[in-house]
Amino acid sequence: MNQEVPLPPKRPRPKVTIPQPLGLYAGDLLVRTREYFEAFNQLGAEAENAHLFARYFLFFHALELLLKAFLASKGVSKRDLRLKYGHSIEDIYDAAVALGMHPLSNVKVIAKNLDVLNSQQDFRYPSGYNLHVQSPAFCRESYEALRMAIEPRISTEVQKASLQLHSDFRGQTVIWKDE
């Protein structure tokens, strides 16, 4: 007769509350930037010049998050990303270059132009402004060039942070609590 041996009751895993490691946050930003960039492309699927204000708002945010992912992977705190850089893509771009990102002139031009438009929230609210920005194709190519240049660096930091987290907190439930 085979008699089943009862398993001992599971002990609850100890919980630890820590700030989210910046490398993992960079990975979260990378996932989110892909969503915004994909939406930018999908809104133009029927016609390249369709839904321009909505598309450029999505593109602006995709570019902002991609650059912030790079900064987070280099150790820039969530607080600084939010308060020091805010939504100024040109400032975020300049900080990324200062931290070792290879400058891409097309991205710098787009960042400067989008900052001017975003300063008055022209993408979000009617302002009587006649939209004049680089073409969606130019923006798409520039974003992809930037993504291809920095995503491998970000991914490396994500992997390092993940390994470190699992090593430091093995068998524990980790809860993020940031500033």
Image (cartoon, rainbow, N blue to C red):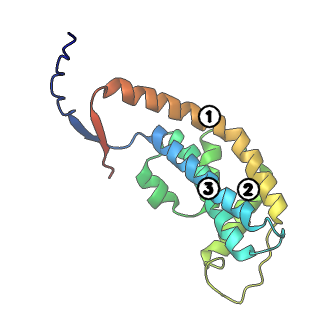
Is residue 62 visible in the rendered structure shown here? yes
Distance in Å between CA atoms under marks 3 and 2: 22 Å
Residue 126 point in image, percent of width and height: 65, 87
Query: Quadrant where the N terminus lies?
Result: top left
Left or right for 87, reference 116:
left
Distance in Å between CA atoms under marks 3 and 1: 20 Å
Left or right for 141, reference 156:
right
**In the image, what residue type sits under mark 3?**
Glu
Q: Tell which tag, 3 or 1, sits nearer the viewer.
A: 3
Residue 83 point in image, percent of width and height: 45, 60
**In the image, what residue type sits under mark 1?**
Arg
Q: Report helix, strand or loop for mark 2.
A: helix
- Residue 153's tag is 1
- The residue where tag 2 is placed is 108
- The residue where tag 3 is placed is 35
Extreme-top residue of the structure: 1
Sequence-earlier tag: 2 or 1: 2
Sequence-earlier tag: 3 or 2: 3
Q: Residues within 10 Å of mark 1 (few under 14, many from 20)?
A: some
Is the residue 118 above or below the residue 40 in the image?
Answer: below
